[in-house]
Amino acid sequence: MKRLTLTATITALALTLGACSSSGSADAPVKPLDDAGEKLAMERFSTFKDDLKSLRSYHATGTVDADDGTQTTDFTFDRQKDAFKGAASIDSGSLDLSIELIRTSGLLWIKGPEEYWESFGYDATPALGKYVVFQAAQGDQIAKTYDYDRLVSTVESMSTGEVTVEGEVEVKDSESIRYMLGEEGRSTLLDLPAGGDISTATLVSRADDVDATIVIDEFDVETDVSAPDPDEVTQPQGS
């Protein structure tokens, strides 16, 4: 069975802000802004950055495309608990499956089908229909692959000197302002709505022929990320 290299490494690349963005919505034509427009755009970025500082929760969807497959994610993040929950779908050759994840209180729980556990060399029988709990370093290593809040926190802490206004773009019939975060050639793109309330944001990144897009929305919607019931949990089993 072919294992997805992207499962453990690719999204982490997208979270480093160390990638050159050049695919998907990143290919949309950019209309440069005049000096006045750039000034307003930077003020809009500053507003977004300030809003992030008080953001308690949000919804995030992600798509990661690589030569060996595609991974899509749908998570809710509770920043007050440093927690998230949701699902990831993996499609790579003959492997097509979904897993559920919960991250809270420093632990990670995963519920997946038989082929998911077997791909890691685990005995899948005790895990079927249950969450497997991972602790300490092992859980941290898996969780960081999906922890988009690392990226959100990086954007929150960026200075305006690290941000360049690229111009105005139209993606899916919506006008957005495009920003380049970080140095040219080692950057991630950020799209914010050109007008009105900033109710969504899109980050697009590419590294080593891996394309990653993350969309965050539903800011401050009430959420509760809690550990699953103990009856639904088992420990990881060796092969």
Image (cartoon, rainbow, N blue to C red):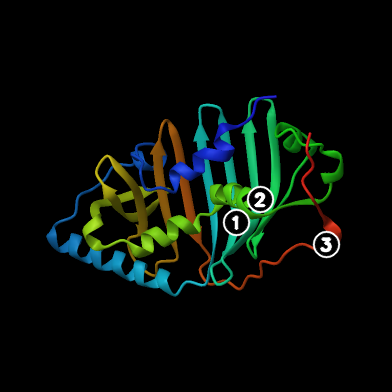
Direction from residue 95 to residue 114 in the image, left or right: right
Q: Which mark is residue 227?
A: none
Mark before the other along the chain sequence, 1 or 2: 1
Counting residues from the start of the chain, the first of labels 3 and 1 encountered is 1
Asked if the residue at tag 2 contacts the one at tag 3, i.e. Cβ–Cβ closer than 8 Å, the answer is no
Residue at 70 percent across and 34 percent down: it is 120
Which residue is at a point 60% across and 56% down the rendered structure image? 75
Q: Nearer the viewer, mark 3 or mark 2?
A: 3
Residue at figure coordinates x 29%, y 68% from the top left = 46
Q: Residue furthest left?
A: 35
Q: Where is residue 131 in the image (x, y as percent from the top left)?
A: 77, 52
**What's the amino acid at mark 1?**
Phe
User: Helix, strand or loop at disc 1?
Assistant: strand
* Quadrant hosting residue 82: bottom right
Residue 137 is situated, as x and y percent measured from the top left of the image, at 60, 51
Q: What element carries label 2?
A: strand
How far apart are labels 1 and 2 at the CA level? 6 Å
Residue name at image x 86 percent, y 60 percent: 231
As drawn, the label of residue 87 is: 2
Across and down, in percent, residue 103 comes to 64, 59
